[in-house]
Amino acid sequence: MQVNSSRASAGRISVIRPEFFTPKYWLTWSGIGILRVLEMLPYATQRYVGSRIGMLIRHLPSVYTRIARRNIELCFPRLSPVEQTQLLERHCESLGIGLCEIATTWWSCDERVRKLAHVEGVEHLVAALAKGRGAILVGGHFTTIEIATRILGTVVPLNVVYRPTKNALLARVMCKGFSRHGNPIAHDDIRSMIRALKHNEAVWYAPDQSYRNKGAVMANFFAIPAATSTATSRLARISGAAVLTYFPERLPGNAGYRVHIGPELQDYPGDSAMHDVDRFNALLQAQILKVPEQYLWMHRRFKGLSADYPDYYGRDARPARPSHESRSPSVEA
């Protein structure tokens, strides 16, 4: 089922700069070439290659693997050490598959993507857009985040809020990939988000990573206080847009994906931004518990707003950099 939009979306793609062909970017070109080859492979082969990459990631002495282990320890204290290790291994495998899914996200045709995915709850999005005030689709940072936005882009002309990478060549390729199925919006471009909603369009973003700028609150995530953005409440209040959840699930074997668009959140935003955050976190946690290995555990989620909060990551913690930490939009009322 296709949802119509009142305005066509198109990303702004810069021309290829001569510097992209210097040695600085040769490794990036190699990675892009590998992804292009992966895109031509059958889905089952992609998954197999991804799982092998995940096994490699698991055994690398990476700070991100240690962070993932720590997050799993914090969020699943009732699991035994052996069970926590097994979950970490499944997570790394899921992450490897997610890396391969980037190829499908950027270059595959809509028909191939549709054959791989079953979209539930489209009627909720249709009903929200019928009100004429746009729709905010909020999700989470799962290892399926790339393919999930691609799937959603086959259903509705989509505005994807993203954070550009520091690698200029990769940022260009990523932006071009996004633009094939929607309109990319930089995470700090609040005006473009509001403009899209005013044109009755759908805006997707994931507000679940550590956020320590103005408007942050310490909200419980798996019963642990975590610095969290309240931007969704403010964006909904400013625009009058409906807020819906959008959660993906990579199915076992080669069955593809199931993604679910939830019904419009009623009485949202409420009287308390903290209450709104808690509502979303509860929904997000329920989805994580369905597919715990598919959540992106390699992010330092439990960084406090100040030194008064525990240092959960020790040597793997980084100094606070408020202007660069979050992928969530900062909306000022």
Image: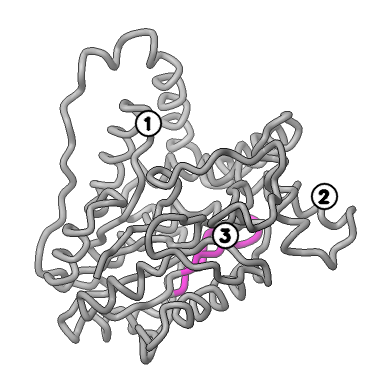
Q: How much space separates mark 3 and mark 1, taking CA atoms?
A: 29 Å
Residue type at mark 2 is Thr
Residue 271 is situated, as x and y percent measured from the top left of the image, at 38, 88
**First reached walking from the N terminus: tag 2 or tag 1:** 2
Q: Name the foreground residue: 234 vs 186.
A: 234
Where is residue 72? Give x, y as percent. 73, 56
Q: Nearer the viewer, mark 3 or mark 1?
A: 1
Say which quarter of the image contains residue 119.
bottom left
The answer to whether 112 is drawn above or below residue 225 in the figure is above
As shown in the figure, which amino acid type bears the numbered disc 1? Answer: Lys
Which residue shows up at 28% across the image and 71% down it? 235
Residue 123 position (above or below residue 18): below
Q: Which residues are magenta?
A: 247-260
Which residue shows up at 37% across the image and 27% down it? Answer: 167
Which mark is drawn over residue 166? Answer: 1
Please identify, in this view, whether the residue under mark 2 or under mark 3 is nearer the observer: 2
Indicate whether 268 appears above or below 214.
below
